[in-house]
Amino acid sequence: MNNQSLSAFIWSVADLLRGEYKQSDYGKVILPFTVLRRLDCVLEATKGAVLAEAKAKQAMGVNLDPFLLKKSGESFYNITPMDMGKLMGDPDHIRENLESYVQGFSANVRDIFDRFKFMAQVEELAKFGLLYQVTEKFAQIDLHPKAVDNAQMGAIFEELIRKFAELSNETAGEHFTPREVIRLMVDLLFVEDGDVLTKPGVVRTIYDPTAGTGGMLSVAGEYLTQLNPKASLVMYGQELNDASYAICKADMLIKGQDVGNIVAGNTLSDDGHPATKFDYMLSNPPFGVEWKKVEKQVRDEHEKKGFAGRFGPGLPRVSDGSLLFLMHLLSKMRPAKDGGSRFGIVLNGSPLFTGGAASGESEIRRHVLEYDMLEAIIGLPTDMFYNTGISTYVWIVSNRKPEARKGKVQLIDASGFWQKMRKSLGSKRKEMSEEHIGIVTRLFGAFVEARLATVLDKDGKQIAQQVVEQGETAPHAPEGGKVKLAPLSRIFPNEAFGYRTITVERPLRDGNGNIVKGEKGKLKGKPQPDASLRDTENVPLSEDVEAYFAREVLPHAADAWIDQDKTKTGYEIPFNRHFYVFEPPRPLAEIDADLKQVTDRIKAMIEGLAA
């Protein structure tokens, strides 16, 4: 069987569950049983040796772990004589024997089944009289490494996870990022490092602090294997949700990864990899989710550790913790002298512009831009995620920018690169094709400005689209048609996103219109400001403040001045403004002609009715 038919065969166990289980709960049975059967098959060859070693070492009273791991040749083992085939030989005691078998695994595997709440599912199946049938069905499936290697098993398990996620798509976005979004992020992450990654025996680390079911780590692993079968990608992650953590850990185990690198818990309040730095990182943190539950720990770290901790630049408002994950990833970057790091993170629109000058959000953006770590931001189409239709953006951040990128940021508007899905999944109605991903990756890799040319026929219908890179000629319009050009990739200096907020004061006047002067302190003898006339102006960093003030303010308020003590520096990235294309309104004569046509038609209909 190929991967897809094998995963379909495994999923057919759902036929046994129909009626007793809700569709969205099928995965709670199928996923842990798949893991159990795979581990059962993997350990089959060394079962006898492990049991003999356990018996010999138990008599000596030593720690069994290192000896049994060595005998099993894997990162796990089982010390019971039971296996799934033997379970079938005693139908009357299937529940007790299955429980004993699972408890015989090493602690790292028992943790997976505990997080799956597997024994609760076993109880349910026993109650419905289905336990023997379900176990028998899985015992018949050959998942031995000789029949299904680690890469195939990983693909099968991911297909099962996807089915599970689709059936429970009301919350799928919490633990499942669409595969094409991950593909795009992974392509962007690796595209500039092709020379290094193709060397034989190269080893790199990758980390996801919001690992979910491990999809991002898996796709990154697949990419590197395709690029260089002799390369090794060591995976690390952390996940808050127990069920997602169990799936991720099981997936890593199935693929032969060290599951000790996958940690449970809240990344923000309890960093599972406190001293570790990584080569690459990926993350899709929850959009617009408040961080009130971990506020005390985060504020303590910010105030007590400053830049020695993870949250030195500032804290965003409590209603949205996305930027906390961005800062967490910054803290995990290898120093540039040790090779540096690159990461991709999916964020909603809020982190681009929320918060005025000197606010927590602005200070975080300022830190990233002034330290020249932001390589690019890619705007994705709406309706791409399972639990939200909002606009989303991929940030690519690195402390080892290539020379051409230094001091610059690339913005790519991929919001128009999508195709309609045959069947919507929750809020997900659109997907990016391989071609779309390829265009975005190429523009990023080439670091070029480009426009999207849309060719329209004389009726305004789209007949073609073409990416026009800087220096290339746009396509010609057909007879009676036209070509619309819209920016697709733009490159800006870092300071283009910075500004100073200046406070403009005007004098307080008395009833006769005379300026009121201060009588004491630093305002003594100087015009007293009128709070009701106070205003602020945002001046781009690239502009001289005094020149701006003379041009934009003084012609309208000759008595105004700047309160220098209140000037603040801020940063925002108004992504959509940089891609806005003004569409002039239709000529009035054309609109009048259309209206006359409509009114004439209505008039003729009324006359016809009257006749």
Image (tube, grey):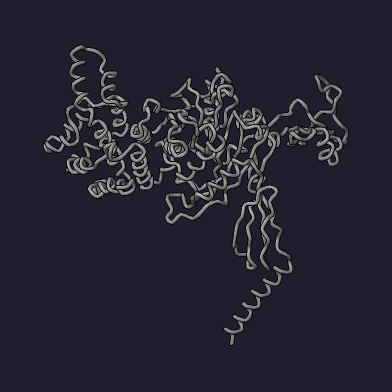
x then y, percent, for residue 479: 68, 68
Based on the displayed image, in which of its 4 quarters is residue 159 positioned?
top left
Q: Is residue 293 visible?
A: no
In this rendering, the answer to whether 564 lies above or below 451 is above
Q: Which residue lies furthest to the front in this view?
A: 200
x then y, percent, for residue 554: 85, 38
Q: Residue at x 84, y 21 (%)?
A: 524
Based on the displayed image, in which of its 4 quarters is residue 530 positioned?
top right
Q: Which residue is drawn at 28% across and 41% down?
A: 30
x then y, percent, for residue 254: 33, 34
Using residue 217 as the reference point, say whether residue 600 is left or right of it.
Answer: right
In this rendering, the answer to whether 100 lies above or below 64 is below
Using residue 181 as the reference point, say whether residue 568 is left or right of it.
Answer: right
Q: In which quarter of the image is the C terminus?
A: bottom right
Q: Is residue 337 visible?
A: yes
In this rendering, the answer to whether 38 lies above or below 47 is below
Q: Residue at x 70, y 30 (%)?
A: 569
In this view, the residue in front, 568 or 324, is 324
Q: Which residue is drawn at 59% across and 62% down?
A: 463
Q: Which residue lies furthest to the bottom in this view?
A: 611
In this view, the residue in front, 3 or 461, is 3
